[in-house]
Amino acid sequence: MSSWTGGAAAAEADAAKLKEFEGKTDPADKEATALLEEMRAHTAKLAALRKNEDPRLSFSTPEFKEASRVFAEAFKVCRSGRRADGAGGWLQP
C-alpha cells in the first residue's frame, strides 16, 4: 500500500510550482529542459497516485493510529481471559 501523498492541496501546490519553473526555464538550456521534463513526469505520476487516494486507508493518519491503539488495548484485555459480549462490552468468563 502506498503512503499518503497529500491530497488535492498538495496536487495544486505541485502544479503551481511546476508552472513557476516552466516560466523561469530557458528553452535553449538543454539541461534545464531535461530537468523540467523530469519534473513534469514526476508531477504527473503523483497526480495519478492521488487520483484514487483515500486518506482513510493510510497507516500514518491519526485516525488509524488511534484505532490501532484501541484495538491493541482491547486485544490485551481479550487475551487476559475476558470475552466480548454482543453489545461491544466486556464480560468475565
Image: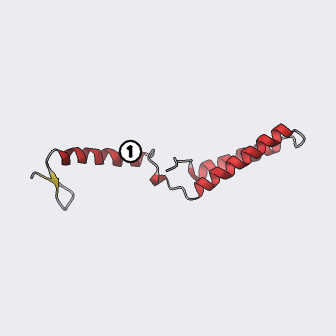
Residue lying furthest bottom? 86
Q: Which residue is tagged 1?
A: 65
Is 84 displayed left or right of 29 in the figure?
left
How packed mark 1 is, by other alpha carbons closer than 10 Å (few <14, some 14-19, many 20 or more), is few
Mark 1 secondary-structure assignment: helix
Q: How many marks?
A: 1
Q: Is residue 69 left or right of residue 12?
A: left
- In screen coordinates, is 92 left or right of 7? left
Residue at image coords 63%, 55%: 48
Q: Residue at x 86, y 40 (%)?
A: 30
User: Where in the figure is residue 19, as x and y percent of width and height?
Assistant: 76, 47
Residue at far right of view: 28
Q: Position of residue 50 (x, y in %)?
A: 59, 54
Q: How is the image coloured?
A: secondary structure
Give x and y (percent) for residue 72: 28, 45
Furthest-left residue in view?
93
Residue shown at 9% from the left, 52% from the top: 93
The amino acid on which the numbered mark 1 sits, given as a three-letter code, is Lys
Q: Position of residue 26 (x, y in %)?
A: 87, 40
